[in-house]
Image: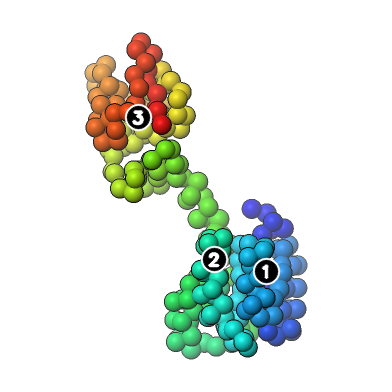
Amino acid sequence: MKKKETKILLVDDEPDILEIVSYNLSAEGYNVSTAEGGHEAIAKAKKEKPHLIILDVMMPEMDGIETCEKMRAIPELSQTIITFLTARGEDYSQVAGFEAGADDYITKPIKPKVLTSKVKALLRRLKEEDQAEDNKTKVGDIIINRDEYKITQNGKDIVLPRKEFELLSLLASRPGKVFKREDILDKVWGNEVVVGGRTIDVHIRKLREKIGDHHFKTVKGVGYKFVL
């Protein structure tokens, strides 16, 4: 995600803070918008769907804690990172912020370089979450999690041995495609020694028992395919 595509919503009732922080983040190349209160911030967040919201705690009418709670109730903002920017450093204020759904806390005054570094770190977290999500594939009623070598079927976690997982992951990567036996051996077992010529068949049988027979179809003389 490029900086100019990264949307940041800055919320504070002090014009000077808005101007200074907005200037520094814009100078870094971010797409920055501002709001001077909770109600305006919620309206803009719904419309713009920012990647990051920097939210002051002490604001009139609707404070940052309440604003954060209302934002967290909006489904479209579930993946948005929210961090508080405030002069208050009391523990109870931070606890209240986290309980409201905030991801982090920045205490002002803060030097521009420190602020931009903090923002980069927060956005890096979002990128890492996106990449982690990329390592999950949903195929029919099955979610394949490559990071954890785990699958979830209809909400139930199923842990597979490594080769069974890799075989399922390969077949499910192209539902309906017939994978030839030699291709399966090459991609799943590689140069490893295969004990017995029926190794694939044994692993397919185990997957049928654990995942469901209807998901695997044998194409005689050719190989196997995954069926939704």
Report helix, strand or loop for mark 1.
helix
Q: Residue at x 49, y 79 (%)?
A: 97
On the image, the x and y values in percent for residue 13 come to 68, 84
Nearer the observer, 156 or 4: 156
Q: CA distance from mark 2 to mark 1?
A: 12 Å
Q: Is residue 8 above or below residue 180?
A: below
Q: Earlier in the sequence, mark 1 or mark 3?
A: 1
Does 210 sit left or right of 53 as displayed? left
Q: CA distance from mark 1 to mark 3?
A: 45 Å
Find disc 3 in the rendering and name its residue.
Answer: 215
Type of amino acid at the residue the image marks with label 3: His
Q: Residue at x 48, y 50 (%)?
A: 133
User: Do labels 1 and 3 touch, CB within 8 Å?
Assistant: no
Type of amino acid at the residue the image marks with label 2: Ile
Find disc 1 in the rendering and name its residue.
Answer: 44
Q: Earlier in the sequence, mark 2 or mark 1?
A: 1
Nearer the observer, 217 or 172: 217
Q: Is residue 213 above or below residue 90?
A: above
Report helix, strand or loop for mark 2.
loop
On the image, the x and y values in percent for residue 219 come to 37, 16
Q: Residue at x 51, y 75 (%)?
A: 69
Find disc 2 in the rendering and name its residue.
Answer: 74
Q: CA distance from mark 2 to mark 3?
A: 37 Å
